[in-house]
Structures are given as structure tokens and as C-alpha cells.
Amino acid sequence: MDRLKTQRRKRFGIQALWTLLTNANFTGFLDGKLYKGPLKQFCVPGLNCYSCPGALGSCPIGAMQALAGSPDYALSLLVLGFLMVVGGLGGRLVCGFLCPFGWFQDLLHRIPFPKKFSTRRLRPLTWLKYGVLVVFVFLLPNLMVNVLGMGDPTFCKYLCPQGILEGALPLAAVSENTRAALGALFQWKFALLLAVVLLSVMVSRPFCKYLCPLGAIYALFNKFSLYRLRFLPEECVHCGKCVTICPMDCDPTRDPNSPECIRCGECVAVCPTRALQKPKIGAGLPDKTAPYKGVEL
């Protein structure tokens, strides 16, 4: 249990520090002005709204939509290449450690409340996020274009609760013009944010599990990213602790690098026999004859 507490404290610290660093334009929260310096042309790996007054970088999902329909295909490929590099290195490690909205949901889940509802029976709904990725990030922004040929950022505009949390609410708090401009779309997205907040108190990371298109992209890399968990089946005593503790409803004994795994490390921390292990960077290539799943780096 001490290992679990240590792992949780370490991950919490990294999440907090990363959120602080990527939203370090503190004066923006006071004057309601967005940072538009040179750093804003680069993407951050997690879901962090461009319109947040503290944001120093751009959201990769927002950037992809903003470039939809644009003749500047080089920039579109640059964003896609960024996601491929990040995904290839760690897969959904980003979701577990470097996503501000993931951290927000983790904080909400710490609120004392009976956690009796199991989402394992809802596992088929995890496919929804891939539909959101295809329809709202790729298809609609390329089909719904204006007279200038620019796509409509449909996910950011209609589904992303992070835009309300980090963008609309802080800006409305300090800007009368922003408050006056709020309408039906704000009300819809605020209701969506409220639903995510309430669900996050009861179950772990509902947005990450079912709706996040960024998580869907990184999930595609989990099986072959450089960072992968190592499972030693001969050491497993089938106690079930890793299955019970997993916030994403994974079974590490069946698939230690499931597309749903966010690399939080809690399964490794509770394993009594060390059958589950984190990658050991610099340990060399794995022995292909070794009877385990995953890769030791």
C-alpha cells in the first residue's frame, strides 16, 4: 500500500506541475487576454484549451481542426507528426501524466462519495471516442468549411468541456464583453461540463474513457509505443488486485498494454509479486523467447 501511495503522490505532483507549466501566463487570468507569443505555435501533448488565458501552447485537437480545409497542408502534417511522435514514445502515458483535463477528473474522483458503480459493464462504450475522433475531428471540420475554405472546429465548438473550464469561464469572470456574448452554445457546453464533473465524482475519468479523441489517438500507439508495461505471467498469483485498482477498467494480466491503459502505474504498485513491471530504460532489447507480454526497454 505504501508503494501505491508513493505512486499516486508522484503522479499527482507531475500532473500538477505540468498543468502549471503549460498554463503559466498568469496575468491572462487577471486581464482576460490570451497569450499569443511564439510558444503558442507549438502544441502541448494533452487536452489544454488554446483559449485558456494562461495557456502557453496550443491543443493538438484544436490545431488539427483549425487547419482543416486549409491549403497549408505542411502545418497539418506537422501536427499529425507531433501526435505520432508523442504517441510512439509513450502512448496514453500522456493521459495519465500530462493532460490537465485528466488531472481535473482525477481530482474530482478524490471527493468522498460512494464509488459503488462499476463501469466495466460499459466497456463497449469506450469505442465512442473513436467515433468522435473520426466524425468531429476529421470529417465534419473538412466538410463544414466557410467561404475561405476553413473548417469549423466541431469538436472544440460542440463537445469539448475543457474549452468551457479553461476558456469561457475564466474569461467570463474578468470580461464583461465575454459575459455578454455567452448564449445557447455556452449553456449546452456548460451542461456537458457539469455532467462530466458529476460523473467524475462517481466514476473514474468518464470523459477519457468514452469521449476524448486525443485519448483515442494515443490509444492506437499503446501496443507498440516505446513505453510499455512488462508482464511476467509465471510470477502472477491471480490475486486480482491489479484489475480492481485500475481506473480505466483494464485487466493487465490479459493485456498489460491495453488501448485503455493510461500508464498510471497503480497496477504495478499493488502487484504483490512484481509480476507487473514498468519499463527499465537502458536495459537493452527484450529476449524474444521470454515468456511475458510487452517490452522491456
Image (cartoon, rainbow, N blue to C red):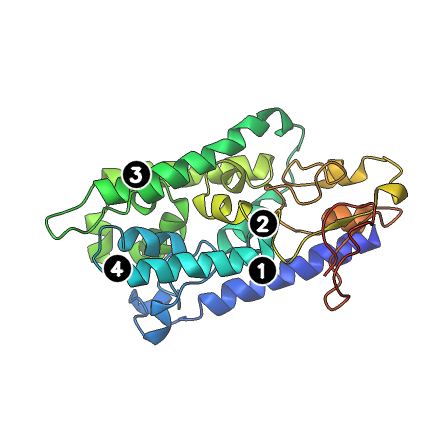
**Foreground tag (2 vs 4):** 2
Amino acid on which disc 3 is placed: Gln
* Nearer to me, 122 or 166: 122
Q: Distance between the residues labelled 2 and 1?
A: 26 Å
- Indicate the secondary structure of the residue bearing disc 3: helix
Q: How packed is label 1: few (under 14 Cα within 10 Å), some, or many (20 or more)?
A: some
Residue at which label 1 appears: 89
Q: How many labels does the image show?
A: 4
Residue at which label 2 appears: 107
Q: Do we see residue 205 in this rendering?
A: yes
Estimate the x, y position of residue 244 in percent, counting from the top left: 75, 36
Q: Residue furthest left?
A: 147
**Foreground tag (2 vs 1):** 1
Write the residue at 10% across / 49% down: 147
Q: Quarter-wise, where is residue 243 in the image?
A: top right
Residue at which label 3 appears: 187
Residue at which label 4 appears: 175
Q: Distance between the residues labelled 1 and 3?
A: 38 Å
Estimate the x, y position of residue 30 in percent, counting from the top left: 35, 68
- Indicate the secondary structure of the residue bearing disc 4: loop
Q: Distance between the residues labelled 3 and 4?
A: 18 Å
Earlier sequence position, callout 1 versus callout 4? 1
